[in-house]
Image (tube, rainbow, N blue to C red):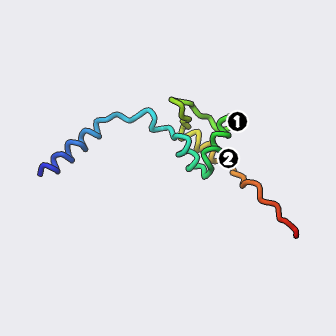
Amino acid sequence: MVAYARQQFHADRRSCVPDSPFDDYLDLVEAARELGIHPQSLRRLIKQKRVPAVLFAGKYLIERDKLEMFKANYDPRPGRKPLRRLI
């Protein structure tokens, strides 16, 4: 009975917590995973100003809506293929 009361207390407490202003943002790793690319590649796209991002506390944050707009038009190119050796 005590365990159930404790669970209810914490459930009620969580429902009172306001939404975080960062819920609409993804960090660099999450956004890269969403795009299917390496985080370093996304960092390069941010520095090229192709992906809008905000630097907050040393971390890049990307808005979900803007990432979805970028994702709709983005076509990740595969890396260079190794040369075939003819021997």
For this view, does 21 lie left or right of residue 27?
A: left
The local crowd at label 1, few if under 14, some if 14 to 19, many if 20 or more residues have their Cα within 10 Å, is few
Task: Indicate the quadrant where residue 59 lies.
Answer: top right
Distance between the alpha carbons at the discs numbered 2 and 1: 16 Å
User: Most extreme residue toward the left, as rendered?
Assistant: 1
From the image, state whether disc 2 or disc 1 is nearer to you.
Answer: 1
For this view, does 14 lie left or right of residue 32?
A: left
Residue at mark 2: 73
User: Most extreme residue toward the front, as rendered?
Assistant: 87
Q: Position of residue 43 (x, y in %)?
A: 63, 40
Residue at mark 1: 48
Q: Is residue 31 above or below residue 58?
A: below
Q: Earlier in the sequence, mark 2 or mark 1?
A: 1
Residue occupying image coordinates x 62% and y 49%: 38
Residue occupying image coordinates x 16% and y 50%: 3
Callout 2: helix, strand or loop?
A: helix
Residue occupying image coordinates x 67% and y 35%: 47
